[in-house]
Every structure is written in C-alpha cells, then in structure tokens.
Amino acid sequence: MRDEILALLQKEFLTKQFYGEKIEVKVDLKDMVEKKITEENIQQPNVYITVNAYQKILTLVKEFSSEVAWHCLVEHPEGTNAYLIYDVLVFPQEVTGSTANGIDNEYEMWLATLPDEQFEKCRCHMHSHVNMGVAPSGVDENYRANLLTQVTDYYMFMIINKKSEYTLRFYDVVNNILYDDMELIICFEDGTPLQTWYDSVKDVVKEKKVLPTITTYKSPYEDDTEDYWKKKQTTPGTKKGRGRPKKNKEDNYITIQGPENDIRKFVSIDHAVNYIYNYYPNTNHRFSKNMMRHNLAKHKAIAYDVHKLDFDYEFMDKPGGLEYAILRCDFWEVLKNESE
C-alpha cells in the first residue's frame, strides 16, 4: 500500500512545475484497500472463540476492579480465513484502575518459558477497561504499534469492559490491511457457533400471552332491581342485639407459610413483620416494613424462603380465593386465612 501512495506522489511531482509550493495529493485509502482486496482475492478474517476461553475472559473482567491484561492462543487452519481463540494466558503485570503493564524482567522471563507451541500461537493481546468505554487510548495505540514491529503475519487486539462491550482489531501484516470493529464469534469446542445452537432451539420456546384482568366496581346504590331490595329486607326476629356480628377468632391471626409448609401465626400484623425482619437481620427485603404491613393487612398471608438471602414479595389474585406470593420467580402457594 505504501508503494502505491509513493507512486501517486511521484506522478504528481513530475506532472507539475515545482516552485517551493506544497503539492496536494488526495488519496482515497478506502477505495485502494477495496481494490487490493478484490484484485488479490483477499478474504476477510473470521475470528472465533471457544466458550471455555470466553468464560475465562469474562471471569477476569468481572473479578478484577482494576484493569487486567492477558494473551490468547490462536489456531489458524492453513488455507482458511478462520482464526480460533482457544485459550487465555495471564502474564505477570502491575495494574491500576486505568493501566495494566507487564512487570519488567518478569514478563520477559515468563514469555521465554512458554512452550514453543504456545509461543508460536500467542497472536492476540487483550485487556479490560473496567467500567470505561472500549475505544483504545493513546497508550494502547503506542503499545500496539511497538508490538506490530515484531509481527510478520497477523495479530489481534481486543478491549472489553464489565458490560461485555468490546472492540476487536485484526492486523493482516502480510497484506498490510487493518480490520477494525471485528465480530467475535463464540463457538463450542467442535467449532459450532453458539448462535447456530440458539437458532436451532429458539422456536420450541413459546411466549404465553397473558390477558390483563380488569376489575370493575359497582355501587350497590346503583342497583334498583327488585332482587336487590329483596336481599336488603330483614326478617323480623332473626337479628339479635345491635352492632357488628362477632368475628371468628381465626380471622384475627396473620398466617405466614413457608416453602416447607411450615405455618406460623401471629396475633397482629406488627408481630408478623417484626418476626420476619428480626429473624432475618441480614436479608435484603424488597418491601419496607410499611409495605409489608399493607400486604399482610390486604391478603392475611405471605410466603418466605429460608434458603434465600434476598426476599422479593409480590401478590396477585387467583380465582377460587387463593393468593400467590412470587418469591424470586419461585411460586409458593399461600392459602388465604387457612391454617393447615
């Protein structure tokens, strides 16, 4: 590519009189690259990575709160445009929140002790940007430029952050072509892309369409039918005394039922709420005490799971007088106002 540009400059210089002024030459590098790829039948590389290697990368990025760097081993079957990243090698380094540099002498010693097979296939450098964007910094560009002076065929660089965003560059040194923003194709050990597997199973999963339940309220005063007023009539002598009828003693209890069908009863809502919060002091409750009191007052029932650290309560109605408490997507059936 450099020879073509120099030829254009020489042509421009020879065809114009030169009196010390600048010679302006506009070069469309994109057209030149596309022409070179077409004429020489150069295939764009496809970069694959095994599930095992990808999980190692995600683990490094997740566990370190600082930057961290590593090399990758790459297989390139001769005569193909496929490049498979199959393993990850973490080298000695010193890191900060924004840098990851190999330790002098230790890094060189580590590199020298690699088996020949691994050394020859060490064709990729990656590092994390923690929570920052994944565009290469000036330091990154300088590191890449220095490393590429030692490369004669190809090399890859990738930056990834905790959101799994990444930028992948592929340098084809032989043809002097840089491929930017490459896609990383995750695959199984046999080479089958993960997306291919997903496409083969996605059609068996059907999303259930749930129609919204609409509850309407009608005031009894709007009903002037004969049947309604008949119901309102009171037979003489059937009602003794005055005031509200006495409640069943069971109605005063607040029932808490767990996943093992263990049932606890409390004489008041406050007792029930305090029990839940005091018995699990290290639990992160989604509901505040006031919200839990509201739900208990409304439903007289709640579910809890002693095996979970996070409590997540939600209630919804079900025909037949039953209530469901949704706890972290696990459904525990709770009988309203029943003890056993």
Image: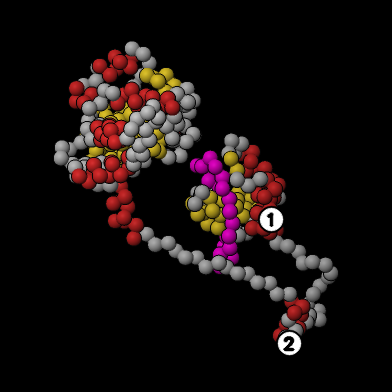
What percent of the width, then of the height, locates residue 58? 39, 35
Secondary structure state at the residue bearing disc 1: helix
Crowding at dot 1, Cα within 10 Å, few <14 / some 14-19 / many 20+, comes out as few
Is residue 313 part of the magenta span, yes or no? yes
Q: Which residues are magenta?
A: 304-323
**What amino acid does circle 2 point to?**
Glu
From what the image shows, is residue 336 above or below residue 121? below
From what the image shows, is residue 202 above or below residue 319? above
Give the numbered dot on residue 226: 2
Q: Depth check: give the residue in front, 185 or 149.
A: 149
- Please state if 174 lies on the left or on the right of 253 as rendered: left
- Residue depicted at 29% across the width and 56% down the height: 200
What percent of the width, then of the height, locates residue 20? 39, 27
Task: Tell me which corner region of the image, top left, top right, bottom left or bottom right, holds residue 82.
Answer: top left
In this rendering, the count of numbered labels is 2
- Residue depicted at 58% across the width and 60% down the height: 316
Q: Quadrant of the N terminus?
A: top left
- Residue depicted at 23% across the width and 42% down the height: 36
Is residue 32 part of the magenta span, yes or no? no
- Please state if 127 lies on the left or on the right of 230 as rendered: left
Residue furthest left as drawn? 79
What percent of the width, then of the height, locates residue 240? 81, 72
From what the image shows, is residue 100 above or below residue 178? above
Q: Depth check: give the residue in front, 66 or 188.
A: 66
Crowding at dot 2, Cα within 10 Å, few <14 / some 14-19 / many 20+, comes out as few
Q: CA distance from mark 2 to mark 1?
A: 35 Å
- Please state if 285 lies on the left or on the right of 210 as rendered: right
**What amino acid does circle 1 point to?**
Ala
Quick one: label 2 or label 1, which is nearer the N terminus?
2
The residue tagged 1 is 297
Secondary structure state at the residue bearing disc 2: helix
Q: Quadrant of the C terminus?
A: bottom right
